Image (cartoon, grey):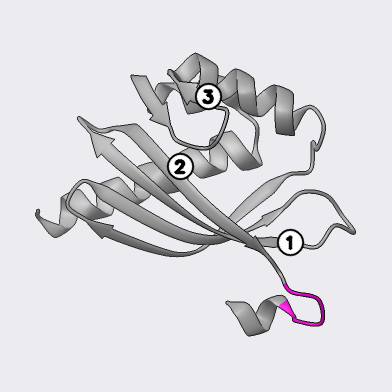
Amino acid sequence: MPSDALAENKKLVADYVESFYNRKDFDNAKLLLAEDFANHHHGVGTGRERTVETFREMVADRFPEFSLTILRTVAEGDLVWTHGVVRIAPGVPPSIVVDIWRVRDGLLAEHWDVGQSVPDGATLDELV
């Protein structure tokens, strides 16, 4: 895959993360998702509407200061991996996450994620 296509895929993911997780601009975020977007995060399911509504109910409404900061991004073929930090609310220890996104026809088509808490006594600087 040409490097400009990989850069476009990385930008698509970065734009989605900023719209969806950080600004909570769900209308814009939906424009970046395929209609049949498959979110493999437990309990979310398939479809752009379901992804947005589940996140809104489970996270955004309960934790309005939730944010995801991308630290690293890798792209290969139609996949983009991000390594980042999730902050749920002030005073709550952050978590480290890895998200994997599949791009199809210029839209996000699929998502997987894994995460772990920052261990007691460790600093975020040591882990990233």
Considering only order in the chain, which callout, 1 or 2, is on the residue closer to the N terminus? 2
Task: Give the residue at x 63% y 62%.
Answer: 116
Residue 79: x percent and y percent? 27, 49
Task: Give the residue at x 45% y 19%.
Answer: 48
Are the two marked residues, 2 and 3, in contact with CB atoms closer than 8 angstroms?
no
Mark 2 to mark 1 CA distance (whole Å): 22 Å
Residue kind at label 2, given as amino acid type: Asp
* Residue identified by numbered label 2: 15
Mark 3 to mark 1 CA distance (whole Å): 22 Å
Considering only order in the chain, which callout, 1 or 3, is on the residue closer to the N terminus? 3
Task: Give the residue at x 62% y 51%.
Answer: 68
88 is within the stretch colored magenta: no
Q: Is residue 46 above or below residue 88?
A: above
Q: Is residue 20 visible?
A: yes
Query: Which label lies toward us, 2 or 3?
Result: 3
Camera-nearest residue between 34 and 100: 100
Residue 124: x percent and y percent? 70, 75
Task: Give the residue at x 57% y 34%.
Answer: 20
Residue kind at label 1, given as amino acid type: Pro
Q: Say few, some or many: other residues with alpha carbon within 10 Å of mark 2 (under 14 / 14 to 19 / 20 or more).
A: some
Residue kind at label 3, given as amino acid type: Thr
Mark 2 to mark 3 CA distance (whole Å): 16 Å
Magenta-colored span: 119-123
* Residue identified by numbered label 1: 94
In the displayed structure image, the side of residue 99 where residue 24 appears, left or right? right
